[in-house]
Amino acid sequence: MASFKSFGLIYVQANTGGASGGHCGLRIGDEVYHLQQQDDGFFRLVRQPWGQFLHVYNDIENRPLFFAKTHLSPEKVQALEEYFLRLLLAQERNFENLRSLKGEVEFWEKLIRGGPYTLFVPGLGLYSSRIKKCPFQSEMVRVKKRILREFGPDFISKEKEALKKRTLSLYPESLDLVLPSSKKQLVPQVTPFSKRISEFSALYFALKQLDQGACLKREVLVDAGPLEASFKEVLKEFSKKVEASIVSLLGSKRPDRGYAILVQMARLLAIQESIRQGHLFVLDTFPEPCSKVEFENYKQDLDGLRKILRDLENSVYAFQKELSIKKDLDEPAYTRLENLVSRYVELKRALVSKKAVRILDGLGIPEKGQVAEIPWKLDFLLEGERLKEAKRALNLYRERLKGLYSYNLIERNCVTELVGCMKMFSGAEGLGVPEATPIPFIYFTRWVKNMEAEEVEFYPGFRIRRLEKMYMAKGRLAYFREFNTLTSSIYHPHPADTSFLLFTDDVFLLRPIYGGINAAFGAANMLFGAVLLPFDRGCAFINGFWGLVYSVPELFFANIRKGSFVYVESNNGYKEGPKVVSRAVDGLL
């Protein structure tokens, strides 16, 4: 019997930035499924924990949010959840194949140009070639002895020789390409020649590191500070699991096990260094290349970032204590710890040095790679036709994915694609989902009516919630300090919010008047920005222009801009609690 899970549609009101027309998502249990446009231009399905979704949209982005709690049998909810997970799996396969095809083109382009037989090996950049007097070496010598006891004294040399034979027997074959016909189709994994060479090479280098006594590069270790005494014992137990996983991987037939072994050996060395020095060391999880925010772009938000830093530092120690109590550290939890520590140390470094800070969405796996020469001489003919075929396959696949994952404001947006996903569900006729409309708030009202939502939960934006608390403590006179961006104690001007003076999201009759003042303020900033053009590359002018643009709807009683925040403490399950409102939500939207 399936257990009951919350189910329903989410509507997020507009603000400046990426969702100026509002946003919709589907909540299933404690997860939210919604669509976002990625940096590569593709419009992809995203799965995000409900608490994190609230923190980003409702707190940091300060967007009021509605959740239409809708009745659906537990069996249908579970089936729908499994269906969305399959969609995510098919989507990840598609983009994994696209990455493989890009790698194939790059491989042949390099060889045709007469370049060396080199490739990028993920994980290899974690290790140093200087192994003399390496503090990590004794640990890997011990692990090597265990492996040779289990698999035989000649295991490493035999495995390397077998790899060589398998690699030299490879020959570039025509790509067996299956193009996805729909988002739910799980196509076969594309394994082009370059990917097979890469997998074999990664395994070879993993064996080589094991054989010579792997030594980590110091710069890949990040230090979170003193190790909690109780957590030290937990790490000791976890190191045994990591060592066992290395042994297991060496005995497996996983084609990608080379990279996994490189990462696990590096993790084992980081754990042993933590135990040895009494400091928590983990591997840097930021990929290369990585998105960065320059100091000039965040220097106005230093107070907020220092709060984030304190929050991260507290979270590192709290997570250690939590894991110490459980006394059972597994790989997913250790990955979260790696990411938490990496973010904490990165922000601390950036604030101290006043330099760019790296940013990363989601959880990263230590993947610091290195370009290395292919260990074996490949004696096949370098035919130009191979490059042509690789480019043709890449173009075909990319165009097909553009057809499946493209974005269009009217025809393919967060609502139409989400509804399209639900319509493909095999039990869609039992859901009764209304037909899509491109406007999020109109579709939300249609959902509430047609799906007979049990109730609608309303989550006011962060600023309004803080304002209501202030009214309760200090009375309504607090409004005269908080109604503008210059004297507000809750809000601090944020570059992403454009130039504006007065908040209009908490007034209605006065909104056109406030909007007129905001429009004049934006125009004044444009004039001031015109003077600064030679010095700030037009930043002030553009800020004023968009300030004027977002003020226009306010003249007609509409509101888009609400202000956003660099830092908001995690809501920890939404302390204020949602407000249950009437199913007649039209007036609130």
Image (tube, grey):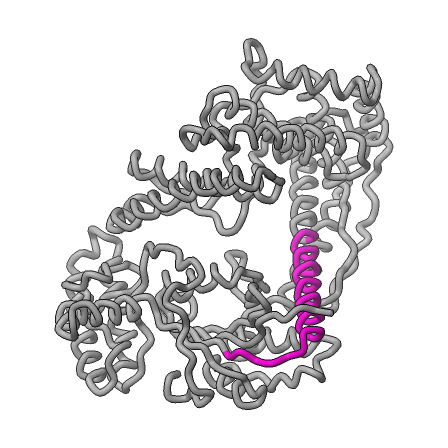
Q: Position of residue 95 (x, y in %)?
A: 65, 55
* Along the line of sight, the residue nearer the viewer: 71 or 422: 71
Q: Is residue 551 magenta?
A: no
Q: Position of residue 375 (x, y in %)?
A: 72, 24
Q: Is residue 497 above or below residue 537?
A: below
Q: Is residue 12 above or below residue 285?
A: below
Residue at the limit of the structure toward the front, as seen here = 325
Tell me which corner region of the image, top left, top right, bottom left or bottom right, holds residue 208.
top right
Q: Is residue 288 visible?
A: no
Q: Residue at x 65, y 42 (%)?
A: 106
Q: Is residue 367 visible?
A: yes
Compared across the picture, whether 67 is left or right of 183 comes to: left
Q: Is residue 342 above or below residue 265?
A: below
Q: Position of residue 401 (x, y in %)?
A: 65, 63
Q: Position of residue 578 (x, y in %)?
A: 41, 73
Compared across the picture, whether 3 is left or right of 567 comes to: right
Q: Is residue 96 magenta?
A: yes
Q: Quadrant of the C terminus?
A: bottom left
* Along the line of sight, the residue nearer the viewer: 279 or 147: 279
Q: Residue at x 84, y 38 (%)?
A: 171
Tell me which corner region of the image, top left, top right, bottom left or bottom right, holds residue 234.
top right
Q: Residue at x 47, y 63 (%)?
A: 53
Provide the residue span drawn in magenta.
Answer: 68-97
